[in-house]
Amino acid sequence: VCRPGFFKASAHSPSCSKCPPHSYTLDEASTSCLCEEHYFRKESDPPTMACTRPPSAPRSAISNINETSVFLEWIPPADTGGRQDVSYYIACKKCSSHSGLCEACGGHVRYLPQQTGLKNTSVMMVDLLAHTNYTFEIEAVNGVSDQSPGARQFVSVNVTTNQAAPSPVSTVKKGKITKNSISLSWQEPGQPNGIILEYEIKYFEKDQETSYTIIKSKETTITADGLKPGSAYIFQIRARTAAGYGGFSQRFEFETSPLLAASSDDSQIPIIVVSVTVGVILLAVVIGFLLSGRRCGYSKAKQDPEEEKMHFHNGHIKLPGVRTYVDPHTYEDPNQAVHEFAKEIEASCITIERVIGAGEFGEVCSGRLKLQGKREFPVAIKTLKVGYTEKQRRDFLGEASIMGQFDHPNIIHLEGVVTKSKPVMIVTEYMENGSLDTFLKKNDGQFTVIQLVGMLRGIASGMKYLSDMGYVHRDLAARNILINSNLVCKVSDFGLSRVLEDDPEAAYTTRGGKIPIRWTAPEAIAFRKFTSASDVWSYGIVMWEVMSYGERPYWEMTNQDVIKAVEEGYRLPSPMDCPAALYQLMLDCWQKDRNSRPKFDEIVSMLDKLIRNPSSLKTLVNASSRASNLLVEHSPVGSGAYRSVSEWLEAIKMGRYTEIFMENGYSSMDAVAQVTLEDLRRLGVTLVGHQKKIMNSLQDMKVPLVNGMVPL
């Protein structure tokens, strides 16, 4: 007979067995053990198996947002409950930005690979609504989760999807109609997919589609005037968000009033009405003018009307939906350019809080901007130093004239300029994490590959927008990418004079002028041929910077050595632990023939595919191919270049580990040359970035080095 704490599953069992973990018996001759409180046994579990409990919540969930899809990744729970059958369930909730209330997402959302029974620690949700707040709950479950009465254990992630092009306007209503005008109104699109920036109204006389007019309006009403009496007109409307234009609405047909002769008595009435109206308007203008200087807000030297009208004939002029960059240097008067593209801000609306850096023309500060009718919000402020020349002022404001033409979530946003008082200022959105290269160096090894690819995707999306507008950046580099607290990367620095004059990374070329050699395509160095294709080359270097956490391209090689090596067909090696697919994309960007390089829209598409299929990022460039790819790396190189271990570690800025190396017998450079990654971990070098830096340096010592790189 089995005593308490023991059991015999059947009479045929030879002896009593001790109760498995987290179970017990109170009576003698028990055939099974009872589970302790909060522990359970699945019906199919044998009596010899320990009682188990539901797992704890997953940990460290991160998200990567790509327009209307979200990729989630997490770490398994710290406590699996003692079971091996852990899987994951994803709950999706759509939350109102006004009330904060949430509801289930519904069946239109797709989960890749699935919503329930997930074995991997990642999932992608697609077909989400644009510009919408979502909460995702990731719950770990196992075989006994259904038996537990306790609360669900999950980790939640809150995200807001990006803006997208809006859906078409569905209903248009006619308002006042006269013999020469038609007034219309409409409702916002059913799916705005973001903040509606403006509407574009296209209209033409019926059966005269090749000659049409475009009106732009920020309101949901317009009046089309200058029409023919008694004529039918066709109208179509589309809306625009920061992501671009949506599709045009269906065609709506309206007819102007017929031409009727007015009597002499009646004709006097409009004259009186017009006279009174003009008087009222003049009075309002005078009052408005007197008050305008006392308000915080935007103004323009040449105020744009709410509605802009453009005429198109025979379809030969580019539609306004496809915006084109206008070079501000083509303006005879630079002030006209800045007032054309940038909004004037009253200096009294700006509060400068602290200096965060120094620019070519003056200080860069953080501060706050308070506009009438809007909440105060943080901004970055570039100031023009005292004693500037007219050329410096023109160059300084030239950047604002360029930036003011762009409207994209991955391009730094210009709030406005201050030109009517001193100091002259450029005001932009504030990016909390600063420049990308510095941010990556500070956070070496702290991000997942998916997060890094998300950063690269944002940069590529911004560059696609610039390329589509016909703008060539010329100085694309990680130092000119800004990153905010949500890890959104935005292309910045549109002042070409900085590239040509005071950039520390720039060097004189044989043809004169200064360009950033390490980031610049060979045809741009040799022939000053800057195109979107040369920007693609620079983007490949930015990819390398991101994947190496801000290392300097070509390390300490001289600019002349870089030019010579690249011209001979040599390329940078893969960063350590870089996915093969990303390195191949870098090599594609570095094709000598610029026509063979991918376009930015192709790069965005490639990165989207990698984000949707994270398993494709698990294949890394192996160590042997890294070694064969580069025969020049850091300098000085080779174990003979250092007289001691401490000198070597100091040279690579890892001097903090000198004592550890010496205490563990690595007192000579020959001994150090044999160190492996496992040895580093054993020595206590746990930071991934430090491991990479040391292993990169050790690789230099093992690879024979010559003044050149292995060709593509």
Image (cartoon, rainbow, N blue to C red):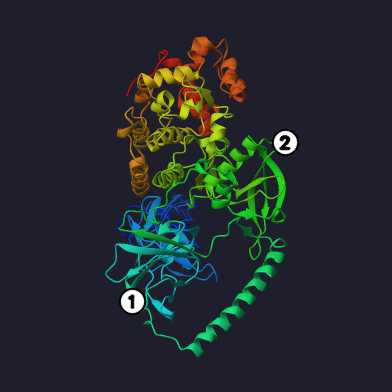
Check disc 1 and give the amino acid type. Ser
The image shows residue 353 at horizontal and vertical percentages of 72, 48
**Residue sitting at x 46%, y 30%:** 519
Instruction: Between label 1 and label 2, give the one nearer the viewer.
Output: 1
Badge 1 vs badge 2, beta-carbon distance below 8 Å: no
**On the rendered image, what quadrant is the N terminus found in?**
bottom left
Q: Which element carries disc 1, helix, strand or loop?
A: loop
Decide which of 551, 124 is in the foreground and name it: 551
**On the rendered image, what quadrant is the C terminus found in?**
top left
10 Å crowding of disc 1: few (<14), some (14-19), many (20+): some
**Which label was assigned to residue 231?**
1
Looking at the image, is 366 positioned above or below residue 232? above
Question: Does any portion of residue 141 appear in the rendered image?
Answer: no
The image shows residue 707 at horizontal and vertical percentages of 42, 13
Among numbered discs 1 and 2, the one appearing first in the sequence: 1
The image shows residue 522 at horizontal and vertical percentages of 40, 25
In this picture, residue 631 sits left or right of residue 210: right
Question: Does any portion of residue 212 appear in the rendered image?
Answer: yes
**Residue sitting at x 72%, y 38%:** 386
The image shows residue 3 at horizontal and vertical percentages of 45, 58
**Which label was assigned to residue 614?**
none
Q: Which element carries disc 2, helix, strand or loop?
A: loop
Decide which of 414, 490 is in the foreground and name it: 414
10 Å crowding of disc 2: few (<14), some (14-19), many (20+): few
Q: CA distance from mark 1 to mark 2?
A: 62 Å
Residue tagged 2: 387
In this picture, residue 276 sits left or right of residue 405: right
Decide which of 493, 215 is in the foreground and name it: 215
The single residue placed furthest to the front in the displayed view is 264
Count of numbered circles in the view: 2
Check disc 2 and give the amino acid type. Gly
Looking at the image, is 248 positioned above or below residue 56? below
